[in-house]
C-alpha cells in the first residue's frame, strides 16, 4: 500500500497531508524542516501537548488563536502567568480549554527558562537528541529510543505532557529526522534543508 497520494499539482506527498488544505500547506512548508528557533520549538512542544487526545487538524485550525493567547509562545512571558491568566485562558473559546494542559504550558515555560539558563538554548538541548541515523520506514513508528530518552529527560526536569509519543511527534515536525515518505516530493527538500542546517 502506497504511503503517498497525489497533491493538487499531481506530485506525490505523504498521504496524511492531502486530506485538507491546512495540512497540505503545513506539510509542504513546515513539517520536517529543521528548526533552531527556541520560540518555535517551545510552541511546537506546547501544541503537541494540547493535541493529546485530539487531532492535529484541530490544533492547526486554532494555532493563531493559541499564538495570540500565549504571547506567540514567548516562554519568558508565559513563565510569569498567574491564576488570573489561567482563568482568562479557560474562557478563551479560540483555544483548547483544558486546565491541565494550560497549567502544563505555564509550568513548561518556567522549566524552559531554567533549561536555557543551563544549556544556553532550548535548541542546544533538543538537538542533542537527533538520531544518529533513522532506521525503519517513514511514519511507521510513534516512538523511538531518542524520543523515549528525550521524554524521560524532560520529565526529570519537571516538564508535563511530554510523553514519548509527544516527543516523537515533536522531533518529526521540528526536523530532528526526515520522516517524509520515501517518494514524497517534499522529502528531498527536507533532506537538502537538513544538510545545510547548522546544528546548535
Image (tube, helix red, strand yellow):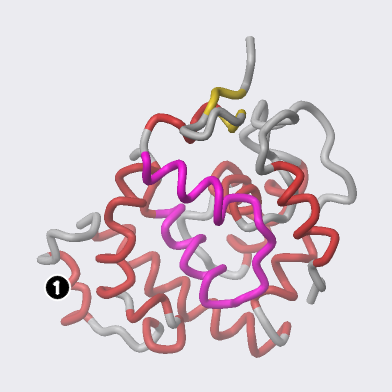
Q: Is residue 33 magenta?
A: yes
> Which SS class for mark 1?
helix
Q: Along the horizontal axis of the image, is 57 left or right of 141?
A: left
Residue under the point 54% across and 85% down: 113
What residue sits right under mark 1 in the picture? 87
Please state the horizontal and vertical placement of residue 180, each as a whole percent of the image.
Answer: 67, 38
Q: Is residue 79 above or below residue 158?
A: below
Image quadrant containing the C terminus:
bottom right
Residue 67 vs residue 107, the one in the foreground: 67
Across and down, in percent, residue 25 comes to 46, 49
Q: Position of residue 10 (x, y in %)?
A: 55, 28
Quarter of the image with the N terminus in it: top right
Residue appearing at x 47%, y 71% in the figure:
108
Q: Main secondary structure of the magenta part?
A: helix
> Is 2 located above or below residue 78 in the figure?
above
Taking 152 as reference, is 81 left or right? left
Q: Is residue 199 left or right of residue 123?
A: right
Residues in magenta, as a range: 21-49
Spot the residue most to the front: 9
Which residue: 53% across, 54% down? 162
Amino acid at each position: 500500500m502506497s504511503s503517498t497520494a497525489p497533491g493538487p499539482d499531481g506530485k506525490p506527498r505523504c498521504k496524511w497531508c492531502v486530506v485538507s488544505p491546512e495540512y497540505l500547506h503545513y506539510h509542504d512548508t513546515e513539517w520536517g524542516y529543521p528548526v533552531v528557533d527556541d520560540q518555535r520549538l517551545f510552541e511546537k512542544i506546547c501544541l503537541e501537548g494540547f493535541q493529546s487526545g485530539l487531532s492535529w487538524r484541530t490544533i492547526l485550525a486554532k494555532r493563531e488563536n493559541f499564538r495570540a493567547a500565549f504571547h506567540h509562545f514567548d516562554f519568558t512571558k508565559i513563565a510569569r502567568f498567574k491564576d488570573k491568566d489561567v482563568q482568562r485562558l479557560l474562557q478563551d473559546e479560540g483555544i483548547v480549554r483544558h486546565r491541565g494542559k494550560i497549567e502544563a504550558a505555564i509550568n513548561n515555560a518556567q522549566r524552559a527558562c531554567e533549561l536555557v539558563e543551563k544549556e544556553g538554548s532550548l535548541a542546544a538541548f533538543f538537538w542533542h537528541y537527533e538520531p544518529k541515523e533513522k532506521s525503519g520506514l517513514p511514519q511507521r513508528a510513534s516512538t523511538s529510543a531518542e524520543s523515549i530518552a528525550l521524554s524521560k529527560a524532560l520529565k526529570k526536569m519537571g516538564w508535563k505532557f511530554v510523553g514519548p509519543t509527544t516527543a516523537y511527534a515533536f522531533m518529526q515536525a521540528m526536523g530532528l529526522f526526515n520522516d517524509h515518505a520515501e517518494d514524497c516530493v517534499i522529502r528531498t527538500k527536507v533532506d537538502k534543508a537538513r544538510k545545510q542546517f547548522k546544528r546548535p
